[in-house]
Image: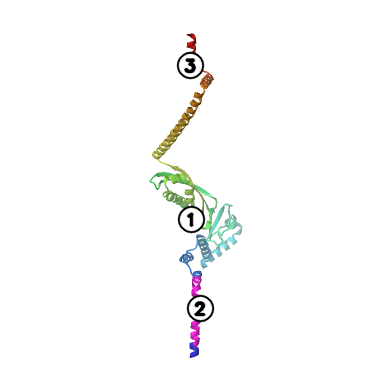
Amino acid sequence: GPRVSDGSTGAGAGCMVEEQRDRGRAPEVFTLNRVSPERQRSDMEPDTTEQLKVRRTDDKEKSNNNLGCCGLILVIISFFLMLITFPFSIWLCIKIVKEYERAIIFRLGRILAGGAKGPGLFFVLPCTDSFVKVDMRTISFDIPPQEILTKDSVTVSVDGVVYYRVQNAILAVANITNADSATRLLAQTTLRNVLGTKNLSQILSDREEIAHNMQTTLDVATDEWGIKVERVEIKDVKLPVQLQRAMAAEAEASREARAKVIAAEGEMNASRALKEAAIVISEAPAALQLRYLQTLTTIAAEKNSTIVFPLPMDLIQNIMGARK
């Protein structure tokens, strides 16, 4: 009894000492082991689109391998018929796709495991298999002119061009009916949505930024269809006729105002130069005579028939005084 109590009291004292020691370092331990809510959210967030693609592809391959008993029997029968008619069935079983194409094989309605086939030769069963060719080259199309109301309530007509290519042939066939038509319609809608949040001045000056935003939006939206949007360009921005006239009048008025300011500055500089020249000429009276002669030379060089030569009044007065 006493030993147990002594031991318990000793253990309690030891625990108290350890607790006191741990109090000083408890915050460090808790801060190291603490998990923030943002980290929990990031851990609980869904996978990225690439991981989803991989999962979808794996699920499809798993489901493709399970054809069932009837499916296996039909495949065996089709293979047996091909062997029986071998010399002639070879023309129906071997297909060719070009370098820029890929073939998606469907066996009894399911995508065949192994992904897209090509380029080159590939083998199909004549009765149970069918295939779809997908063009992997870059495709370009024009966005029809769209009447858009800008943020500052101005109606403009904008068109553009989009360049895209099929990045994943399986997704382009299995996830959407017509990838080309869907991309065209989505490009028109994206053009309206992006330009609807911009002012007219931003549309006219920030075309590269608008094109980049459209490319990013289209690329994210078409990622599940196996399509990669490579480039988007804004071709033309058409303004209403009245707005064009108003902008032209504004630009013309600003240019005229600048021209008047420049002309006034030139006249002011010229008057200052003439003032300085008059001061110099007033100091030397003979300089005025030299200026007369220089003016006469300039007039004679232009091949004029009439030359007006001014005479100084002092010279005339001296001549008249000599006669008297």
- Helix or strand or loop: what does disc 3 sit on? helix
Q: Which residue is mark 2?
A: 18
- Helix or strand or loop: what does disc 1 sit on? helix
Q: Where residue 314 is drawn, which disc sits there?
A: 3
- Residue sitting at x 49%, y 87%: 6
Asked if the stretch drawn in magenta spans residue 137, the answer is no
Q: Nearer the viewer, mark 1 or mark 3?
A: 3
- Residue sitting at x 49%, y 80%: 15
Q: Name which of mark 1 and mark 3 comes first in the sequence.
A: 1
- Helix or strand or loop: what does disc 2 sit on? helix
Q: Where residue 220 is drawn, which disc sits there?
A: 1
In percent of width and height, residue 198 lies at: 42, 48
Q: Are marks 1 and 3 in contact (CB under 8 Å)?
A: no
- Residue sitting at x 47%, y 28%: 275
Q: Nearer the viewer, mark 2 or mark 1?
A: 2
Magenta-tinted stretch: 6-30
In percent of width and height, residue 271 lies at: 46, 29
Q: Residues within 10 Å of mark 3 (few under 14, many from 20)?
A: few
Amino acid type at image mark 1 = Val
Q: Are marks 2 and 3 in contact (CB under 8 Å)?
A: no
Q: Nearer the viewer, residue 22 or 166?
A: 22
Residue furthest right as drawn: 87
Residue furthest bottom as drawn: 1
